[in-house]
Every structure is written in C-alpha cells, then in structure tokens.
Amino acid sequence: MDLLKKLKPMNQDKAPVYEALEEFRRNRVVPFDVPGHKRGRGNPELVKLLGKQCVELDVNSMKPLDNLCHPISVIKEAEALAADAFGAAHAFLMVGGTTSAVQTMVMTACKAGEKIILPRNVHRSVINALVVNGATPIYVNPDTDKKLGIALGMKISQVEKAIEENPDAVAILVNNPTYYGICSNLRKIVEIAHQHNMLVLVDEAHGTHFYFGENMPVTAMAAGADMASVSMHKSGGSLTQSSFLLAGPGVSAGYVRQVINLTQTTSASYLLMASLDVSRRNLALRGKESFRQVCEIAEYARKEINKIGGYYAYGKELINGDSVYDFDTTKLTVFTLDIGLAGIEVYDILRDEYDIQLELGDIGNVLAYISIGDRMREVERLVSALYDIKRLYSRDRTGLFDHEYINPQVVLTPQEAFYAVKEEMIPIRETNGRVCTEFVMSYPPGIPILAPGERITQEIIDYILYAKEKGCSLTGPEDERCERLNVIKEMKLY
C-alpha cells in the first residue's frame, strides 16, 4: 500500500510555501523578530523599490513557515512536490544559487584525498568546492569544435580511459548541457560509472526545461544519475539565486542536508523559496506548452539569423553521436567570427547601440537565452539588429582568436595551490611557466581559463590579453584589473 501511494503522482496544483506565506500575511502577526525593516515600515525606500507585498513576505523562519535547515512541514512538502515534478527521489530548495547546489554535490560525493573525474570546462563552482574539501580532480579534456572553438561533451572513450587509469575515483561529474547546448551520452556515462561503483553528478544548470518540455535531451534523473543541480532561475522562471538540488534513491537525503547546512545560510529568503515553489507549479502544469513555444521561437531565430549570412546559429547538425550526443535547441548561440567581429564585440554593440542584452559574449560566440518569458517580436528585433551589425561593422577576420578553450597543465590540486606560499602580484606578461594560485575566467560563462594549480603558458597569457583587449569581463584574480597574478613562490636553492 505504501509503495502504491509513493508511486501515485502528487497534486502539482499546490504551492505550500507560497500558500503558507499568504496565510501568514493575512493574519497580520505583530513582528518582534527579524528582519529589522518590520514588513517594510522601517525602510520606506525599500518598499518603494520592491513593493509592499514583496517586503511583507520577506520574513524569518518560524513554526508556521518551517525552517530550510531542518524542514518538517511546508518546506518539506514543497521539496516532495519538486522531487515528484522532476522525477527525483529527493529535492532540496537551494537559496545560494546553483553554485551552492554544485558544491553540495561535490562535497557529498568526495572528501580530501579522494579522486573525482570531471571535464575541465566546468563552472568555477566545481573547482571552488575542490579548494574547500581537498579532493583531487582527474580532468577529462574535452574535444573542441575546430570551427566554433567551443569545448564539446565528454566522449565515452575519454570517460573509460579516465576510469581505467583511476579505478579508485569515487565520482564523475558531467556538464549537461553545456552553456552552448552540448549534451554528452549521459545514460552511457551513468551505466559505466555505476559498474565501477562511482557516483554520477550532473551540473544541469542550463537544463531545467529538459524535465518539462517534449523531445528534449535526457534528464539527469531519467538517465539514472545520483545527483543533479538545476538552475530554476535560468530557464525555469524563478527568482535569481534560487535553485534545486536533486538526488536519486542511492543517496542519503539526510547526509545531503547536513552537507548543505555546512555552507548554506540559516536565514533563508522566503521570497526565493516561494519563487521556487510557484515556478515548479507553473512548469508542472504548463511547462510542456511553454517550452514548445520556446523551441519554436529559438528555431525561428536560428533559421532567420542563418539567412543573413556570415553568422552561424548552430543546432542539431552538430550531433555526432559521441562528443555531441545531443543538442539543446533552446540555446540560441551564434558564431560571429566570419563577419570579422569577436562575440564580445557583437555583444557590446547590441547592448550599447540597440538596447539588447544578451546572456553571453565570448571570443567567437554570442548567446541569446530563450525561455518562457520571450516572445517572437523580441526575437525579430534581435535578428534585425544582427543584420544591421553585419552591414555596418563587418570586416576581415584576420588576427581574431579562433578558440575558447585551452587544455590546462595541472601541477597541483586546487586546494594545494590555493593555500600555497605565494609570490604575489606578478605582471601577467612575466608569468609564463609559473603555477597559478587563483582563478582567471571570463564571466559568463564562468569556465576558468586558469584555475589554482595550473601552469601558466604563453598561449594562456596571449588569450587573457586578447580577451581583455576585446572587452571580455575577466574575473577571479585578486587584482581586479587582471594585470597581475599570484603564483606559487619559487624556492631558491643555495
């Protein structure tokens, strides 16, 4: 009987955290707790900025509203509904963004001295977690598309080789999809990993819609992965910084909660939690139709942009059955080098001259993030602007960099390098051959060009200087202008 009850779909019409907040607001409880703005009365400028209803729902944990650190009522119910909607055994509301979900996955799966297999083109949050917990990364360097310059997915042969050489690894982490829409053969990776008693963690930050759309690439949970981090605020429509962490039946939910509580706030925002709750309900009830429209808009845009000439909005034609096992067609990524402009240059022109804000502009591509809030008329405006930019700004592409990803030379683990004795603030042009102790990345996408423990090469220096010249937003190093780097101090022998 209990099994039948468990298998019965839950009522996705409910939004328990949001409903509890609405009930709380109607009761007009007198606040002698935090936050100190006291439903906005103490900060009229905040009320003007956010609105009365918003600040009235910015409240603290209390019995009727449950507690995210140890949920027993409405938050627990909201997490059960999310698990049901995503096809997971367990789901956790995350208010520290998908960064916190990714870091929880890594810190749940491995500890100091243990090995984790992962592609090097991971988000910085993965390597940050390794700095904290001391695990050793075993990098799989992905292939790159020779025309587009972007990193592809994990090839099965690369995964098998990494496992053969590191049979003591405890987990494998997969980006699925990548920022650019590239998907790996997730089912096969899970199968191989589980044969070797390794957990599979999936950074699914850009794949929320996989769970609710039709004819989408396989989801992490459907593929049998052990954990997945899902950026509900990206394609799912919740507030920025809200996310879900999903877990399969082979993972202890209680232990995951303990790991979450090592770093997550004890003052969780009910605005973020309620946004997750109502967004999950929205997608569970209307996601199929919403994402059908998203796919139609993205495909229309792809077709129209490719008609312009010079640009290349890529799609399923990239699929090769291995390093590009599948492709997320909602990702409208456009290769720009053939019109003689770096992606970041097109990105800047669109923003400065056409009031169009894209998600990403890198060395060779721009990314327009298409999701449930987009309409055809905005896409037509984007297409028209790209046509204008080609007409007005195109030039010969001689001298443009043609790749985004450089295979690293790993010398030390991220933790060893980050805490090593440093020789501080060396001019970047003088760092060739030295070992970096910090991150350098263009954000977005947040994939490190350099991570702690990697050797700096002339190719990397040239790339960083070129990215700066073109206007990429470089982040990570202690020097905010990214003109100097911290490197490991060289020991002199006498």
Image (cartoon, helix red, strand yellow):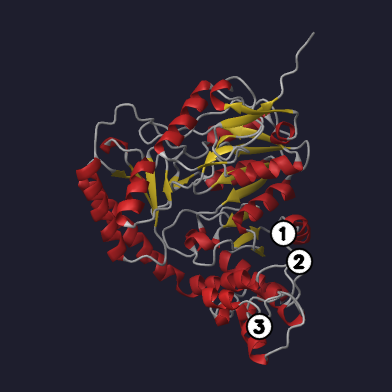
Between marks 2 and 3, how big is the CA–CA gap? 17 Å
What is the number of the mark on residue 264? Answer: 1
Give the image location of residue 361, x and y in percent: 41, 45
Mark 2 — residue? Answer: 69
Callout 2: few (<14), some (14-19), or many (20+) C-alpha neighbours within 10 Å?
some
The residue at the point 55 percent across, 53 percent down is: 204
The residue at the point 66 percent across, 43 percent down is: 128
**Contact, CB < 8 Å: mark 1 with mark 2?**
yes
Residue 262: quarter of image: bottom right
Give the image location of residue 122, x and y in percent: 57, 42
Q: Earlier in the sequence, mark 3 or mark 1?
A: 3
Is 402 in front, or is 114?
Answer: 402
**Contact, CB < 8 Å: mark 3 with mark 1?**
no
Locate residue 130 relative to residue 309 in the image: left or right. Answer: right
Dot 2 lies on which element? loop
Residue 314 in view (yes/no): no
Q: Quadrant of the N terminus?
A: bottom right
Q: Quadrant of the C terminus?
A: top right
Dot 3 lies on which element? helix
In this rendering, the answer to whether 142 lies above or below 46 is above
What is the number of the mark on residue 479? Answer: none
